[in-house]
Image (spheres, grey):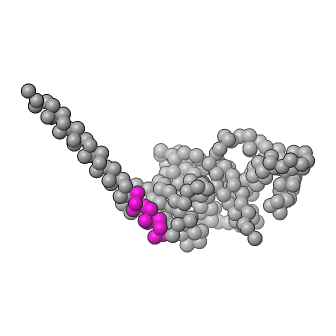
Amino acid sequence: MKEKYFNFPIQLLEDFMKNDTKTILNNISDYVIYEESLTFSQGTNLEKMISCASKYDMTLGNNQKAFDNGKQLYNSFDINPPRAGIKLSIWWDFYKNDKTEFDKICLLCFLAIKSILGRQKSYCKITNKYLWARMDGKVKAVLEIWELSDEVKKYANEYQTKKIKTLLIHNWGLVTFAYHCRGFYVSYKLTLEALIMEAEKRRKSTIEKQYKDHEKELRKKVLDKLRETRP
């Protein structure tokens, strides 16, 4: 049976470490179900919401409250916000079971990388500041660590981030690579060998471009000198 996903704006993860976990997870489900219900053609708006929830084998509890919340959240974002996708099985795991703070920050990191990769990219190169910002529910990279919430800032250092990445590598299917480059490469689709190949191809391309730019600059200097020495 094909796994079902909730695809939602990354901004919904804001305050995930601070607020009650179920509050944020309810916001995610309300948003997704409301958004998808807009594609339904039969019934009232509320009936469409209830029908859509059944697609995910869910009941909404308070139907009207879930509808109002989903509508309000849907109308609060731009048309194409960056999104993350969470498997319904993971959503239920975090909804039903007690999780440690480290479990939660690892989920945020997993979803942050998913949101950066999107649906099209098999890999990409990112920086820690960009990663931390997405973990904090922000769209753009932060310039300074103090811009992060206190809850995420606690993990915004090399030691903690390495611990998180290590867990994601072993338990969540993350593939990552960094070697003499600013930032690091991530993928959930490529093997480590394939990711290294892509990284080294980009490195070679960058070096060749830098050489050509340098060559072009030197040629201009030489031509300028020749013009200055002409009688």
Q: Residue 72: x percent and y percent?
A: 77, 42
Q: Quadrant of the N terminus?
A: bottom right
Q: Who's the residue at 53% across and 63% down the image?
A: 187
* Location of residue 68 with respect to 164 vertically, above or below: above
Q: Residue 58's spot in the image, x, y percent?
A: 83, 60
**Residue nearest the viewer, comparing 141 with 121:** 121
Residue 23 in view in this figure: no
Q: Residue furthest front?
A: 231
Q: Tell me if 147 is positioned left or right of 61 in this view.
A: left
Residue at the top extreme of this rendering: 231
Q: In the rendered view, does 25 fall on the left or right side of 46?
A: left
Q: Which residues are magenta?
A: 192-202
In the rendered image, the quadrant that contains the C terminus is: top left
Q: What percent of the width, then of the height, locates residue 164?
A: 54, 64
Question: Residue pushed farthest left?
Answer: 231
**Helix, strand or loop for the magenta stretch, by majority:** helix
Residue 22: x and y, percent?
Answer: 74, 57
Is-magenta flag for residue 197? yes
Residue lying at 26% horizontally and 43% vertically, measured from the top left: 216
Residue 99 or 182: which is nearer the viewer? 182
